[in-house]
Amino acid sequence: MAHEINDNATHSEIQGCEKLSVAPGMDETKTTINQAFKKAARWQIIVTVAFCFIYLLFSSVNAAISSSLGGLVALAGGYAGVQMTRRRVDQTAGSVLIALLKAELTKIVVIAVLLLAIFKLYNGLVPLALIGGLAASVLVSGAGLGAVGNHKK
């Protein structure tokens, strides 16, 4: 009678399978996160350099530096967020959600602190160029992360 009930624990004991201590798919998730960050970072750097050259051609050196600082702030925030997701957490839905919220909060705090430091320390700041570089870098990052799982078959 006990063999008629097909639950996972009993089934693995009958088949002689060993129990897993790590949730399945953990390594694939880390690989996907790494690939996503690398792709997003590549596009962030390309857009930041492009904006830097555009500001250099049509405005001033200070505007180009401000734009590049904005892109670097977004890149640093993204990196800090990825570092928060690399910590080991349980694979339950609640713990994954909390880990992602912590990573996003870390990203926002890093961006806010770096922007505050730039506003306080850089005397030749062009605020519009800084915000433009930051916005372009963040938008491209979101587009890059959204396109990671879209493979053409």
Image (spheres, rainbow, N blue to C red):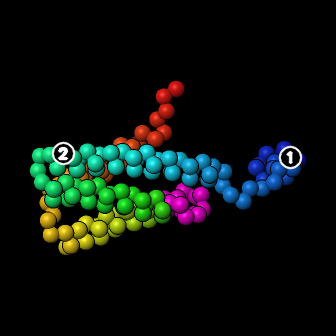
How dense is the environment of label 1, judged by Cα within 10 Å: few (below 14), some, or many (20 and up)?
few
Occupied quadrant, residue 131: bottom left
Residue 100 visible in the snapshot: no
Image point (36%, 56%), residue name: 75
Q: Nearer the viewer, residue 113 or 19?
A: 113
Q: Which residues are magenta?
A: 85-101
On screen, residue 143 above or below 20:
above
59 horizontally vs 12: left or right: left
Image point (45%, 49%), residue name: 38
User: Which label is found at residue 129?
Assistant: none
Q: Which residue is tagged 2?
A: 54
Q: Magenta span has 92?
A: yes
Task: Give the mark, 2 or 1, whose residue is nearer the N terminus.
Answer: 1
Under circle 1, the secondary element is: helix
On screen, residue 58 above or below 23:
above
What's the CA distance linking mark 2 and mark 1? 64 Å
Image point (46%, 41%), residue name: 148
Occupied quadrant, residue 121: bottom left
The x and y percentages for residue 24 are 66, 51
Q: Amino acid at mark 2?
A: Ile
Q: Which residue is tagged 1?
A: 15
